[in-house]
Amino acid sequence: MISEAKNPLITLYGSNYIENDWTLPCMRSWRNILNISPSEFYVLPDKPLSRKERETFSAMDFQVLDANSRVEKFLANYPALDEIRVKDGTWRKIIDAAIIFAEVPKITIIDTDVFIKDKVFLPMEGFDIAYMREDVPAYRGKWNMAWREKMVPALNAGLVTVDPAIIDFDYLEKIVAKYLKNCKNYWWSEQSAWACLAGRTKKRALYSGQQVKVTSGMRKRTVVEIQKNGYKYFGKKGMIESYDEFRNLLDGGSIFHFAGPGKYMFKASYKDFKTSIQPDPVQIVTEPENTLSLSDKFFISMRLYLKEHF
């Protein structure tokens, strides 16, 4: 039962995702998380599921969350959140999950393009929120958000473990109304909200870039920059064209987010993963994370301005 969940793993699922090359292999790979029971795997659909989808998830022992009425009732006092949740389904990762699992110590939210190669233990203690590193600060919103709110740089929300207690709905309502609900494009606006929530707590953590890798399929970051959890404002442009080049970005990792166009390298990577599984379980570790520096604020505000006006 949902009410008895202690360590839930939740994925936001969009219509027909099971037809993608990566979705079902990634979802099956989550059984490699040793400290989350498959009995606590949940699918959070953004639209009604087809019969085929329901049968597929049932066969995989995933529980489907159907709490629309409960969430909508809760949001009656939060009109901006209610509006942006309708406009952009990715917001259900923050809103719905935190409402449904409000009483548990930690929830883990994972995207359907995140693959877990090795047997791993995810960290659960010593932080309020832990997350991945994006190759660039991929946010949306008004330009002044970076100056007025505490944020973290280049957060990627493909894998987030969070204490639902830090998801302050009054605060989210404020920042959505102020910076986000009138975005030209809502893609990445939910990531902006995560960056603000992480910035508000001192107990934030970043997954090790040696173990947990975001691979966008673009040439923005080098192998070393990924390992060191670096991020870029300027870098090489263009797509990685060969798997030989892409493979180098994966070396040593246990968890991979095939973000954006990186998914076109999933098939080749999946075949390769079978020959590089670590023999022993891997404890995923984290490192401390700072909020935005002055240079971060300048460049992020410029990116936000350009995204909204051009």
Image (tube, helix red, strand yellow):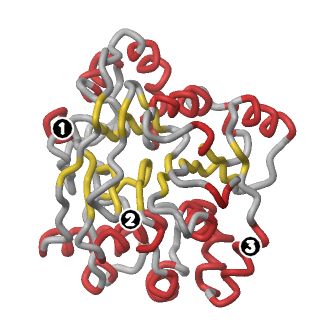
> Which of label 3 and label 2 is nearer to you?
3
Report which residue position mark 1 lands on: 227
Residue 170 appears left or right of 223: right
Q: Which mark is residue 70?
A: 3
How many numbered discs, if any? 3
Q: Earlier in the sequence, mark 3 or mark 1?
A: 3
Query: Which residue type carries mark 3?
Result: Arg
Relative to 47, residue 229 above or below: above
Where's residue 302, x and y in %? 27, 72
Q: Secondary structure at mark 2?
A: loop
Where's residue 262, x and y in %? 42, 35
Q: Secondary structure at mark 3?
A: helix
C-alpha gap between disc 3 and disc 1: 41 Å
Instruction: Point out the image quarter for the C terminus.
Output: bottom left
**Among all residues in the image, which is located at the extreme front?**
4
Report which residue position mark 2 lands on: 139
